[in-house]
Amino acid sequence: MTHAHNTTHPIFADWTTFSTADKPASYIFQSDARGVLIAHVLCMLAAALLLLPLVLFPPATKRLPSRWPARFLRPALHIALCLSLIIGVAFASIHRQATEDLYQHALHRTFGFALVLYVLVTSSLSFVPQVKALLDKQAPVDADFVPLSQLDDMQAGDVSPTGSFASGQSQETLPCFESDGPQGDCHAAATYTTLQQRAARLVENFHKVFLVVTFYAQILLGLATLGGLFRGHEIYNGLAHWIKASVFFIFGLWVFLRYLGITASSGMAWNAPHNGTRLLTAEQIECGLIFTYGVLNLFLERLGHTKEPISHTDIQHMSIALLYACAGGVGLLLESQLLRRLTLSPHSSRDTRRPVLNIMPLLVTFFTGLLMSQHHQDTELASTVHAIWGYFFCIASVFRLLTYLSIFARPDIMQDTMPSRPPTEALVAFSLVAGALVFMASSRDAVQSIEYYDVHTFFVVSLAAAASLCVIVWTCFLTVIMHLST
C-alpha cells in the first residue's frame, strides 16, 4: 500500500504489517459536529478528573467553616457528578446521530453506559439515609445507622450518631451503661458494630478502587475510539501495549505520591525504619507492580496468536517478562521480614534506623530502557518511538540511583521525624509517566497513525512531556483533596 506522501518517506511504503486500512478512520479530523464531540470529551473529563475525586474524598466536616454546608456539600457533589455524566452521554448520542459511525461495536459506548448507570445507582443509594430521616422527621443520622461518609467525622470527635458531640459524652451517659443488661451484651453489641464498620469500610474501599480503575479504563477506551485504534486483530497489540504501559503509569503516580508525603502516615516515607511493624512497605508495592508487569507480559505477548509457532521475537519479549517476574519476586522476598530474621546474625546490630534500600526496581527499569532503546521494529519510526520510552525509563533509573546515593550520603536523615522527600523522586515520577505515555504511543496502530499524518517524533515527545506535567499537577490536586478529607 502506498500513500500520497510516501514519496518523501520511502521506508514507510509498505504498511501491510500494520493495518489493512488505507486511511485511519478517526474522529479527530472529522469536521461534522466537532463542537459536540469536544463538549462530550470535556464533560466526561470533568466528571472523571475533577468531580469523581471530590465525591470519593469529600472535605471533612471539621475543615469546613460551619456545620450547615456539610449537609449539602456531599449531595451536591453526587448530583454534579451525575449531571456531568448524563450531559456527556447526551452529547455523545447527538454526535453519533449527526456523524458517520467510524467505529462500529465500540466497547467505549457499551462500557460507558454501564459505568454511568452504576454511578447513578450508587449515588442514588447515598441519599437513602437522608431521605429516610426526612420522612421519619428524625435527625439526619439515625442512632442505629451511621452513613459511611460520616464515620471519619465521628472518629475525629466531631459528631456522634445521636447528633451530639462524641468527645463530650462520657461512657456513663451512653445507652449501654444506662441499661440493666449484662455488660457482656454491651461488649457483644459494640463488637458487632465494630465489625459492621470494618465491613462497611472494606466495601467502601473496594467501591473507590473499582470506580478509579473503571474510569481510567473508560478514558483509554475513549482515546482508542477517538483515534480509531485497535480494530479487529489489532486489539491484542493494543491491549498488550496499553496494559503494560499502565503498570508504569501507576508506578510513576505512586512514586510522586510518595514524594509528596501522602504515604508518610502509613510509614512509607523514604526515611521510615524497616522495623517489621508495617503490613506493607513502599518497596513491596513497587516490586509488586514489577512482578505484576512480568506475569502479565508472559501472557499478553502471545495474546491473539497462540496458535502460531513461537518466533524469536516472542522469545525476546518473554525473556524481558521473565526478567520482571523474577526481579519482582526477588524484591518481594528481600522485603520479607521472615528472610531478614533468618539472615540476621544473633550478634549483629538490630538497629532499624539504618537505610534498607531495594535496588530491584532500579535494576529492571534501567535494563528495560536499555533493551527498548535497541529493540528492532518493522519500521524506523516504530523503532524510534520504542527507543524514546526506553530512554525515559533509563533516565528514571538514574534519578532513582541518585536518590539512593543521597540517602546513604546522609545517614542522619533516618533520625529525622519528618518524612523525607528527595527531589530526585519527582524526576523519577515524571520520567516514568512520560515513558508510559510514549509506551502507549508505540503500539502498531498508533505508530501507523503517526506516520500517516506525517507527525514527527518530536511531537510525540513534547506531547508526552506536557501530558506528564498535567498528570503531576492533577496528582497534586488529588493530594490536596485527600488531605482535606481527613
Image (cartoon, rainbow, N blue to C red):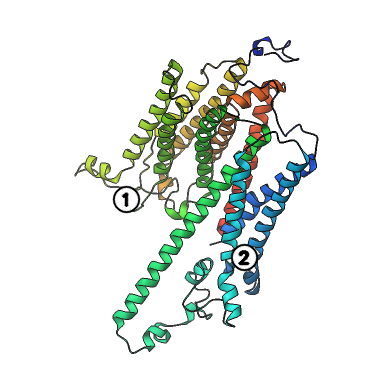
Mark 2 secondary-structure assignment: helix
Q: Quadrant of residue 105?
A: top right
Badge 2, how many Cα within 10 Å: few under 14, some, many 20+? many
Q: Who's the residue at 48% across and 81% down the image?
A: 168
Q: Nearer the viewer, residue 360 or 211?
A: 211
Left or right, 328 with reference to 349: right
Query: Residue 263 — which label?
Result: none
Q: Is residue 452 above or below residue 80?
A: above
Position of the N terminus, as image quadrant, is top right
What type is the residue that disc 2 sits on? Answer: Arg
Q: Is residue 28 above or below residue 206?
A: above
N-terminal label among 1 and 2: 2
Badge 1, how many Cα within 10 Å: few under 14, some, many 20+? some
What type is the residue that disc 1 sits on? Answer: Gly
Q: Is residue 127 above or below residue 186?
A: above
Among all residues in the image, which is located at the extreme left?
346
Residue 449, percent from left and from top: 67, 25
Left or right, 1 with reference to 29: left
Q: Quadrant of residue 76?
A: bottom right
Q: Nearer the viewer, residue 31 or 277?
A: 31
- Residues under numbered marks 1 and 2 in contact, where contact means CB atoms less than 8 Å apart: no
Q: Count all numbered tags in the image, as a single digit.
A: 2
Q: CA distance from mark 1 to mark 2?
A: 39 Å
Name the residue carrying label 2.
74
Name the residue carrying label 1.
276
> Mark 1 or mark 2: which is in front?
2
